[in-house]
Image: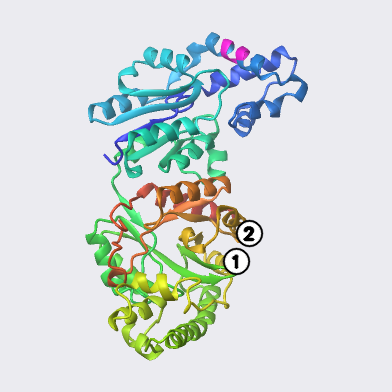
């Protein structure tokens, strides 16, 4: 079992009450001599706080929410027999309890109403705690959920939120945990998929996610950029490490994809062709491309443009290091790199070999990282151009390691908004250097902008020995459903072409 702490939304997730809720809304409209709304309209209007929903269907002068809320709950109680436990919920919740899982209900509904229903449906013994409201206003549950999660002192990898609305995804992001949304709930598949959330059709599918131990890694490097394993060696290492799928994302290069793809066909592992473009506008940004066509002419043209630029930049870094008193040349770095691609990591490794730094990370932190004295600006490719090149090659584009941009959240939101207009699909929501706060904030930003989430270890083998494939520093774990979501997005992209 992958997750041992399960946070359940209630209405529309544990219980199937959408038609009950729609009936209550239309009862209200009928009393006001207004036309009923359809299920499709209901899905589009639902939001949290729920007062926002009624702004769609009533004029301002009729928005007495205390009255609306009171009437709704009277109607809901009258229609209570229409409310059923979601199919499969009883069996799954009892099965999870038997296996020692801890289950909690996090809901915007009044705690008394929830307690009454879980007793009626016979699942009260499965639930350790109900985080319900003390009123009937259906207010945000995010802060209550965060407080509970903090008090439990558990690792985010061990928890998942199961819900049915974007507010549930928002709550899960605030907690910094994984989230799956069911399609039979209060917002429906269409709206959830438009926001690139991961959805499932049934509780049976939720069960599969909870018990699915497969993991993936969408950010690795080979000797075709600044890793120390050949593409074939990397494939075998990924398989040996227990990954079910991984992507090769060499810097500004697709040279290793053919070899890796051929090796993956011999192994029990799914391979995703990728690339990592280094770009610069006001700051250095890295754009990951996944599912790319490595033979696409536009992509290859962009790579060709970057090769000469990269050499000039690496030579400039070496020159700056010499000016700082270090005996470092591009020719030596080229030998470290095996006569192929030279990146900053090769220069850093040379610095370590010569005793100028103890680790590659120290070299970046002191000398060649963004804003450091030997750093050299990129000026050949903008992030927008990188995104467009990836999309032209049929791939999905993601902003990598957001913490390394040097941007605050407002600047990141502006950047992501601009890149989304160019075709950006998402951000890295899983990364070894992220703190819990990073993870929460970046995923929340992705949800706000309807962007998908990817992630990876940024594995370089011996070049970054503290980072291991698939697990990063030991606690990275990207569930397989993230790959399934990306495939759904790719399918949707292809259908609209």
Rendering coords of residue 184 (x, y %)? 49, 30
Rendering coords of residue 3 (x, y %)? 31, 39
Residue receiving disc 1: 384
Q: Say what secondary structure mark 1 lies in.
A: helix
Tell which circle, 2 or 1, labels the residue nearer the N-terminal end: 1
Q: Say what secondary structure mark 2 lies in.
A: helix
Q: Hey, which quadrant is residue 210 in on the image?
A: top left
- Residue at 39% across / 81% down in the picture? 341
- Was residue 28 drawn as part of the magenta stretch in this picture? no
Q: For this view, does 30 lie left or right of residue 374?
A: right
Residue receiving disc 2: 418
The CA span between labels 2 and 1 is: 8 Å
Rendering coords of residue 401 (x, y %)? 45, 60
Q: In the rendered image, is residue 57 in sight? A: yes
The range drawn in magenta is 70-74
Q: Hey, which quadrant is residue 207 in on the image?
A: top left
Rendering coords of residue 325 (x, y %)? 40, 87
Marks 2 and 1: CB-CB under 8 Å?
yes
SS assignment for the magenta stretch, majority: helix
**How packed is label 2: few (under 14 Cα within 10 Å), some, or many (20 or more)?**
some
Q: For this view, does 403 lie left or right of residue 416?
A: left
In the displayed structure, 183 sits above or below 258; it is above
Q: In which quarter of the image is the N terminus?
A: top left
Q: In which quarter of the image is the C terminus?
A: bottom right
Q: In the rendered image, is residue 266 in sight? A: no
Q: For this view, does 483 lie left or right of residue 405?
A: left
Taking the view exactly as shown, the residue that stands out farthest to the front is 325
Q: Observer-nearest residue: 198 or 380?
A: 380
């Amino acid at each position: 079992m992958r997750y041992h702490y399960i946070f359940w939304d209630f209405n529309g997730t544990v219980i199937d009450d959408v038609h009950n809720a729609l009936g209550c809304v239309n009862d209200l409209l009928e009393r006001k001599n207004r036309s009923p709304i359809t299920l499709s309209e209901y899905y589009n209007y639902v939001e949290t706080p729920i007062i926002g929903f009624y702004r769609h269907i009533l004029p301002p002068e009729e928005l007495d929410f205390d009255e609306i809320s009171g009437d709704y709950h009277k109607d809901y109680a009258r229609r209570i027999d229409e409310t059923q436990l979601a199919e499969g919920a009883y069996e799954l919740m009892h099965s999870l309890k038997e296996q020692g899982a801890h289950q909690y209900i996090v809901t915007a509904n009044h705690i008394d109403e929830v307690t009454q229903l879980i007793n009626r449906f016979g699942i009260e013994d499965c639930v350790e705690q109900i985080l319900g409201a003390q009123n009937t206003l259906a207010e945000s549950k995010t802060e209550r959920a965060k407080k509970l999660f903090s008090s439990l002192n558990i690792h985010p990898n061990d928890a998942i939120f199961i819900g049915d609305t974007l507010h549930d995804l928002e709550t899960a992001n605030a907690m910094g945990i994984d989230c799956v949304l069911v399609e039979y709930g209060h917002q429906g598949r269409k709206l959830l998929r438009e926001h690139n959330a991961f959805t499932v059709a049934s509780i049976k599918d939720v069960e599969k996610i909870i018990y699915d131990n497969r993991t993936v890694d969408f950010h690795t490097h080979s000797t075709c950029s600044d890793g120390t394993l050949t593409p074939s060696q990397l494939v075998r290492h990924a398989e040996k490490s227990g990954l079910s799928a991984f992507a090769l994302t060499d810097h500004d290069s697709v040279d290793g994809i053919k070899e890796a793809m051929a090796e993956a066909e011999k192994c029990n592992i799914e391979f995703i062709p990728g690339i990592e473009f280094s770009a610069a506008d006001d700051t250095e940004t890295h754009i990951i491309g996944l599912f790319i066509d490595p033979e696409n002419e536009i992509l290859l043209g962009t790579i060709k443009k970057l090769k000469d630029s990269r050499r000039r930049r690496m030579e400039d870094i070496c020159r700056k290091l010499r000016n700082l008193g270090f005996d470092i040349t591009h020719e030596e770095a080229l030998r470290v790199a095996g006569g192929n691609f030279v990146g900053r990591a090769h220069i850093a490794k040379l610095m370590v070999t010569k005793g100028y730094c103890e680790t590659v990370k120290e070299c970046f932190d002191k000398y060649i990282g963004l804003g450091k004295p030997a750093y050299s600006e990129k000026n050949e490719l903008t992030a927008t151009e990188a995104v467009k090149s990836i999309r032209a090659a049929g791939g999905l584009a993601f902003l990598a390691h957001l913490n390394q941009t040097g941007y605050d959240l407002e600047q990141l939101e502006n950047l992501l908004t601009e890149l989304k207009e160019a075709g950006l699909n998402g951000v890295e929501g899983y990364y070894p250097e992220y703190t819990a706060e990073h993870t929460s904030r970046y995923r929340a930003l992705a949800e706000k902008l309807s962007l998908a989430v990817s992630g990876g270890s940024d594995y370089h083998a011996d070049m970054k020995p503290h980072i291991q494939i698939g697990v990063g520093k030991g606690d990275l774990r990207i569930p397989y459903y993230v790959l399934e979501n990306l495939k759904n997005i790719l399918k949707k992209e292809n259908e609209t072409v």
